[in-house]
Image: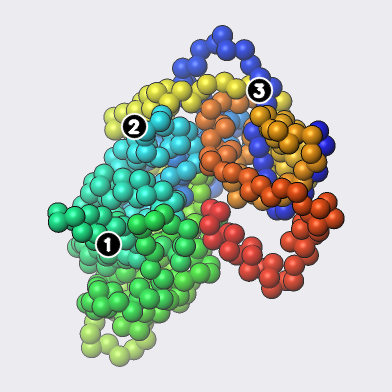
Amino acid sequence: MKIIVGIQALSVITATYACAHDHDHSYTHRSNVPLTLTPPSRPLEWGDINIIHTTDSHGWLLGHQKTSFPEPNYSGDFGEFASFVAHMKELALKKDVDLLLVDSGDLHDGTGLTDGFPPGGVDAHDANKFFSQLPYDLLTIGNHELYIYANALDMHLNFAPKFKGRYLSSNVNITLLDEHGNNVSIPVGERFAKFKTRKGRQITSVGVLYDFTDNAANTTVQKVEDMVKEQWFAEAIEEEPDLFLLVGHMPVQRDDWPLVFNAVRAVHPYTPILIFGGHTHIRDCVQLDGRSMSLESGRYMETVGWMSAKLDNHSKNKNSKSKPKNIKFSRRYLDPNRVTYEYHTRKDKTEFDTESGMSITTGLKALAAAFDLDFLFGTAPHDFTINRDPYPSEGSSLSLFAADALPVALIVNNSRASIPNLIITNSGSQRFDIYAGPFTKNDQLTASPFTDQFLFIPDIKLSVANAVLASLNNAGAENRRSLIQGREATEY
């Protein structure tokens, strides 16, 4: 069979050497932290208000377990993170300052812990039980909570209630049947939250999702520009707090954060605003003015974000007519591993693990075993990367996909196997690199967690088919930019 493969953008597929099935498939969490793992270069800078931030965890609760660089940097599991948070809370008490824990969404789709559930299960339902054991002060919804209605319903019924009004979905609703059998549209979580910190600071928060349009039926996402015009929003921000803590599944560098920020600033020109975003899977920081800071903390539990602010009393001084000074902020991106955690908590390995943290780790291992995530498909002879190796090359996942995987996959039960094909694909369905060594069920789901289908168009002239890829790649700059931005809005 002859296959002509045209690739637009980047792709990856999982292909390894097969194994014999006479071995133990029980799950074992591999601890691969090298002794030479570099510790942080300096302590964190604390302020009056301090925030630990996570986002786009996508089920990476057992940490990154491979030995290839840079995976050991992110090898801390969620139980170890829980111990880190507990010790940091103790430090905040000793320093007599506020410390809050915040998450910006996307808990679904990414590893076997979320996607490896048996038939009849719900994505991330079991993994989220461990996530909810941490003392999050504020959380918001992500787009990956909305692709499948059952996932959104599970978040509404089982996840959001555990946070007692602190799981926010300011512009995201779910449609349910009321007691009379009528359809009603209500927030998945809460529209906004107002609460007081341990030190007595008044906080006002909203939780916003970008203008996502691929959500499941019976869920709705209101445009951000329309949300800020709602009466409830005006009423929520009317009273001045000590600070606004805004969380959202939106990139901090672009998108619609200025719409929310400007709406608040129109009412409260000098009140401190702390913004925590997500979605684009990067480490990023921006200041919209001198009394605000916006932070985005990566993806896949590869980053734990830190922000601190030294506040003043200007917002409470109603008689002040002078423009206040800028607030002093600090921010850091932490690599989630035991070396980092022990350094910042001032604990050694004999005193770091808390009872709660160890329980979470044990529970996650048990869940992985129940899902048979160590089931061995084969062995990857070396690393295959999505974008660190050029295409075509031996280390390119794109090359593996085009040259090895597709020709085999498309001749299985295929009555058209003798007819030439041209295949065009992009990177949207592929999520992570493949690393040398055992290739397991968990690795399969981290590399490609989605069930995707090919769109088949038969009996196209080769001359026409050959022109498609060139047309896509040679589109005008403005069209190409629009296509890329549209794809980026959903592929994360």
First in residue order: circle 2 vs circle 3? 2
Looking at the picture, tell me which residue is in the foreground, 264 or 350: 264
**Relative to 373, does residue 210 appear above or below in the rendering?**
below
Residue under the image location 36 percent in, 58 percent down: 219
Q: CA distance from mark 2 to mark 3?
A: 29 Å
Mark 2, secondary structure of its residue: helix
In percent of width and height, residue 406 lies at 71, 36
Residue under the image location 42 percent in, 22 percent down: 369
- Residue tagged by mark 1? 185
Which residue lies most toward the top here? 22
Looking at the picture, tell me which residue is in the foreground, 335 or 62: 62
Q: Quadrant of the N terminus?
A: top right
- Residue tagged by mark 3? 379
Q: CA distance from mark 1 to mark 3?
A: 48 Å
First in residue order: circle 1 vs circle 3? 1
How many neighbours does mark 1 have within 10 angstroms: few (below 14), some (14-19), or many (20 or more)?
some
Instruction: Indicate which label's residue lies in the foreground, 1 or 3.
Output: 1
How many neighbours does mark 3 have within 10 angstroms: few (below 14), some (14-19), or many (20 or more)?
some
**Relative to 4, does residue 445 appear above or below in the rendering?**
above
Looking at the picture, tell me which residue is in the foreground, 101 or 121: 121
Q: Is residue 199 visible?
A: no
Q: What amino acid does circle 3 point to?
A: Thr
Residue 483 image-quadrant placement: bottom right
Mark 1, secondary structure of its residue: strand
Which residue lies most toward the right here? 463
Q: What amino acid does circle 1 point to?
A: Ser
Q: CA distance from mark 2 to mark 1?
A: 35 Å
Residue 360: mark in rendering: 2
- Dot 1 and dot 3 residues touching (CB under 8 Å): no
Q: What amino acid does circle 2 point to?
A: Ile
- Dot 2 and dot 3 residues touching (CB under 8 Å): no
